[in-house]
Amino acid sequence: MLNTREIIRKIWDAQGYGNLAVWNNGATEVIEPGATPQKDGEPPLVIFKPIPLVGGFSMLDFALGDAELLAFVESEVTGAGGEIARD
C-alpha cells in the first residue's frame, strides 16, 4: 500500500528534475515530462508534476502538513485504482 507522506517527500525531491511516476507496488521514478515509462510491462498508476504541487511551500514540513495536498495525492491514487494511507 502506498503512503501519502512518502509520496509527497518524493514529489518534493523530484522538483527541478522531472515528473514523478508512481506504480501500484510503491515503485517511483523521476521521468521527463511527456515520457511514458513502464516497469515490468505496467504503466505508472499516476504521474505527479512536482512544481505545481509543492513549489509554493518554503519547507517540506509545510507540504507534509497541508490537508489539501494530502487529500489531492490520495484522491489521484484512489481515482486511478490504487490504495493509499497516511501514517
Image (spheres, helix red, strand yellow):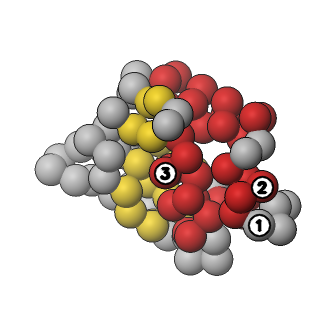
Q: Secondary structure at mark 3?
A: helix
Q: Look at the numbered disc 1 and give the secondary structure of its residue.
A: loop
- Please, what is the three-letter code of the amino acid marked with disc 2? Phe
Instruction: Check disc 1 and report the residue beneath it.
Output: 59
Residue drawn 56% across the image and 77% down it: 17
> At which x and y percent is residue 72?
67, 34
Instruction: Please tell me the numbered disc located at residue 86.
Output: none
Residue type at mark 1 is Met
Q: Quadrant of residue 45?
A: top left
Callout 2–callout 1 Cβ contact below 8 Å = yes
Tell me how far mark 2 sits from mark 3, CA to CA.
14 Å
Q: Is residue 49 above or below residue 78?
A: below
Question: Circle 2: is it few (<14), some (14-19), or many (20+) Cα within 10 Å?
Answer: few
Where residue 6 is drawn, which disc sits there? Answer: 3
The residue at which mark 2 appears reads as 62
From the viewer's perspective, tell me whether residue 81 is left or right of residue 32: left
Query: Which residue is drawn at the image coordinates 15% and 50% (left, top)?
Result: 40
